[in-house]
Image (cartoon, helix red, strand yellow):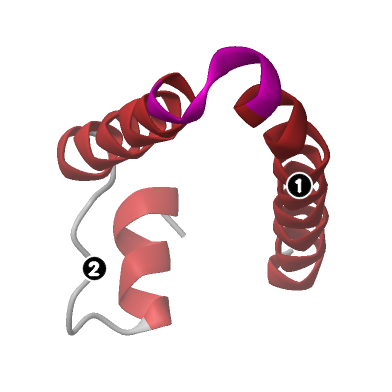
Amino acid sequence: MRGLAISVVGFVNSFVSWGVQFLFPWELSNLGNAVTYLMYAGFAIIGLIVLYRVLPETKEKSLERIEKEYVGA
């Protein structure tokens, strides 16, 4: 399961990276510098909020312990 998940996340990461690289020049020329960078700053802030509110802390936990706690295996 981990191998499949890593592959999917790698694909999504590459696809989003391609999308940013494809749209960035258009955004700069049509929206301007301030709006473009403000938009990406907003995405980063939303990501931080999700990180702190939704994702569980896994510091100093083994993969087996995490699996036992969250999957119930």
> Label 1 amino acid?
Gln
Q: Quadrant of the N terminus?
A: bottom right
Report the disc number at residue 58: 2
Sequence-earlier tag: 2 or 1: 1
Is 35 drawn above or below residue 64 in the view shown?
above
- Marks 2 and 1, how far apart at CA: 32 Å
Q: Where residue 16 sits: x, y (%)?
A: 72, 43
Q: Where residue 32 sits: x, y (%)?
A: 52, 22
Give SS at disc 2. Answer: loop
Which residues lie in the magenta part? 29-34
What residue is disc 1 on? Answer: 21
Residue 11, picture quadrant:
bottom right
Using the image as rendered, state which of residue 60 and residue 39 is in the foreground: 39
Is 71 drawn above or below residue 50 in the view shown?
below
Left or right? Give the position of 22 relative to 27: right
> Label 2 amino acid?
Thr
Q: Where residue 56 sits: x, y (%)?
A: 23, 50
Using the image as rendered, state which of residue 60 and residue 71 is in the foreground: 60
Using the image as rendered, state which of residue 5 and residue 11 is in the foreground: 11
> What secondary structure prevails in the magenta region?
helix
